[in-house]
Image: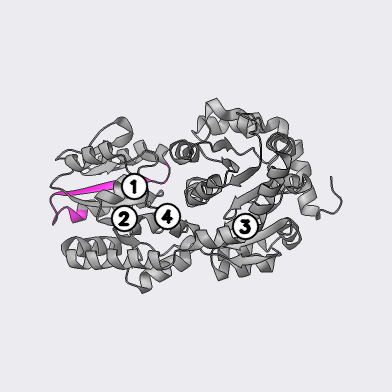
Amino acid sequence: MSKSLPAALRAYRLLSAAVTPLIPLLLARRLALGKEDRARLAERRGEPRYKRPAGALIWVHGASVGELVSVLPLIERLRARGVGVLVTSGTVTSGDVAEQRLPRGVIHQFVPLDAPRYVRRFITHWRPQLALFVEQDLWPNLMIEAAEQGVPLILVNGRLSESSFQRWRRLPDSISNLLRRLDLCLARTPADGARFAELGAPRVITTGNLKLDVPPPPAEAQALSALRAAMAGRTVIAAASTHAGEEEAMIAAHRRLKVNFRRLLTLIVPRHPARGPGIAELAANAGLNVALRSRGELPNDSTDIYVADTVGELGLIYRLAPIVFMGGSLVPHGGQNPIEAAKLGAAIVHGPHVQNFAELYAALDQAHGAEVVADPGRLVASLAALLSQPDTRVRIAAAARETVEAQSGALERTLQSLEPYLMQLQLSAAKDA
């Protein structure tokens, strides 16, 4: 145990080591809640699923689906340079998306839980020459063990909201100690960069938001054709990445809107697909006809609410719904990413709680590329206006797409900042060959 660590970090290290024997109980609980993959539990203990590939290896870590998707183009560019890539994430849904969308030859593992023994086992096996952490998923033991084994650590697409910044400031010595282990901090925005710098991160560079450079999400052609045919002739709206409380608001909105839009079909895509059956029950209790995608159902002429409780199908929904309410924004969650909806031509509606993407939503609102609503009542009014005014809807969608396109370029700036590290990796690999 390093004596140079602040007291809070030393305590964390000791406590996380002491509770390691209890972690199987935690994993069993998470498994029962659907938050772990039974077949891959060993990975959460740092046990590898594969052998380490020969040659240079870059480790890319992102917490969940959003972080993983944001770095897919970056991963593709790294692979194009002939370097091995190991990707870790921490959620079941991210594992599903990794299987569907990671380039050939890229290894995915679930990140080990942040216990010293597990983390040490993981890093010792994989021996990465460079670690790229995405946004802000910085676990103390993971960073400390990697740094002690000589792995350069770089934060990419660094994101730090004002609320997270204020929380981190409560332990200034510990946060500074962790952030100083970063070789480089590539921030999304100047505001993010300033917060990281104030907390102690060295060499902060603003490179922009990688999510703005991600291509629109794919849609399987057969599934798109089948769903489009099932919805033919319907008036469609969607609620994407919703959280508890927002589904009730959309169900209530559907009931009110249906008075004037008799052929209305509302698509609800929960942020956590496991909540699908519960949402279907809410809609049924409200007297509405429901279909559930996870059961293989398609909407028919009498369906009111279609719950798309599946993974990796937002590209399908955004191609079919001309109006999209972005979830996590009517409730104090911080908002969900609107970029994919904007790129696929949706008119975006969102609530007031968008601090996770504050700069982006501010740009969209200023350009009239999105409609902000304060509460469920205003949500109904906004949806009704967009449904009855197709010209306005088209203008909002066009402004959103232009706003997103104007802010692209983060991928090239990120690669430029990483270039010295990538050259060093390739030189070392050539010497070892």
Judge from the rendering whether residue 200 lies leftward or rightward of residue 213; answer left or right.
right
Count neighbours of disc 4 (C-alpha within 10 A) and say few if under 14, some if 14 to 19, many if 20 or more. Answer: many
Query: Would you say the residues marked 2 and 4 are in contact, meaning their CB atoms lie under 8 Å apart?
Result: no
Q: Nearer the viewer, mark 2 or mark 4?
A: 2
Please determine whether, in this image, residue 20 is positioned above or below residue 228: above
Residue at coordinates 25% horizontally, 55% vertically from top-left? 253
Q: CA distance from mark 3 to mark 1?
A: 32 Å
Residue at coordinates 50% horizontally, 33% vertically from top-left? 33
Q: CA distance from mark 1 to mark 2?
A: 8 Å
- Secondary-structure class at tag 2: loop
Q: Amino acid at mark 4?
A: Gly
Residue on which disc 4 sits: 328
Residue at far top of view? 39
Residue 352 lies, in percent from the top left, at 41, 65
Nearest the camera: 207 or 261? 207
Q: Amino acid at mark 1?
A: Gly
- Secondary-structure class at tag 4: loop
Q: Amino acid at mark 2?
A: Leu
Residue 344: mark in rendering: 2
Is 270 covered by the magenta stretch?
A: yes
Query: Would you say the residues marked 1 and 2 are in contact, meaning their CB atoms lie under 8 Å apart?
Result: yes
Q: Quadrant of residue 270?
A: top left
Does label 2 or label 4 sit earlier along the sequence?
4
Q: Is residue 139 visible?
A: no
- What colouring method underlies this structural image? one colour
Q: Which residues are magenta?
A: 256-272
Nearest the camera: 184 or 244? 184
Q: CA distance from mark 1 to mark 4?
A: 18 Å
Q: CA distance from mark 2 to mark 3?
A: 32 Å
